[in-house]
Image (cartoon, coloured by chain):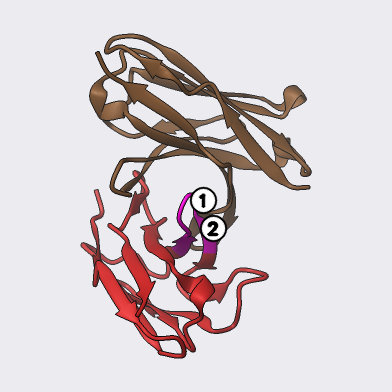
Amino acid sequence: EVKLVESGGSLVQPGESLRLSCTASGFVFSAYNMHWVRQFTGGRLEWVSSITSGNTEYLGSVKGRFTISRENARNSLFLLMNSLTVEDTGIYFCARVVHTNYGPHIDLWGQGTQVTVSS
Amino acid sequence: DIQLTQSPSFLSASVGDRLTITCRASQGISYSLAWYQQKPGKAPELLIFSASTLQGGVPSRFGGSGFGTEFVLTINNLQPEDVATYYCQQVKSSPLTFGGGTKVEIK
């Protein structure tokens, strides 16, 4: 079965760190670019970060605090989140990306992991 | 950043109805738009990419059109299983951005 499974979400205090993981199965993980997307209470979706074989990109509000990485040998994607704020609270989705002439789109989503930042 | 405005934010319709959801971009994005469906408690799923290409396995009652700044998602013959929130996403330039969503309910 083709799937993505996230883990690592929890309740943390402002200023703390968290590392999210995503394990892929059923497809050749190394052949795909991957994204992290988060969803806030109320439903708003926000792209957070992306990784190709050699490049990374970040949303402006997380640049310098979040680090995306991957270990192809372990079919795994990671998101290290430092200096967390209450505005980072949400469900974090791992996502597989397919590219066309018109850009990337997400063709596979994980089930999401909840990150709650609160004192 | 490219802003996407979806309308309406809420739709209540009857089984068998034809629905249209609009997504407007703050600047031209060619055909670089995707549509996703998110059912309650689930992750989003891809419906349409490149503005009008139906993802494999998606029922043919779903359709997409548009170019530049205005895009439309059409649902023909609305079914009970179509109850969900629908999101557009521009994939023209970083940061990739999403519309605010349209929640579809059955009357």
Q: Residues within 10 Å of mark 1 (few under 14, many from 20)?
A: few
**In the shown orientation, is residue B2 left or right of residue A8?**
left
The residue depicted at 77 percent of the width and 44 percent of the height is A27
Q: Is residue B38 magenta?
A: yes
Q: Are marks 1 and 2 in contact (CB under 8 Å)?
A: yes
Q: Colour of chain B?
A: red
Q: Decide which of A63, B78 is in the foreground and name it.
A: B78
For the residue marked with disc 1, what is the amino acid? Lys
Residue sticking out furthest to the top: A16
Q: Which residues are magenta?
A: B35-46
Q: Which residue is mark 1?
A: B42
Q: Is residue B20 magenta?
A: no
For the residue marked with disc 2, what is the amino acid? Glu
Instruction: Find residue A37 and report its horizontal and vertical position in percent.
Output: 44, 40
The residue depicted at 46 percent of the width and 90 percent of the height is B16
Q: Kindly identify which numbered label has been placed on residue B45.
A: 2
Q: Decide which of B25, A76 is in the foreground and name it.
A: A76
Residue B14: image quadrant is bottom left
Q: Compared with residue B61, is residue B38 higher up or lower down, i.e. above or below?
A: above
Chain letter, disc 2 residue: B
Residue B35: image quadrant is bottom left
Residue B95: image quadrant is top left
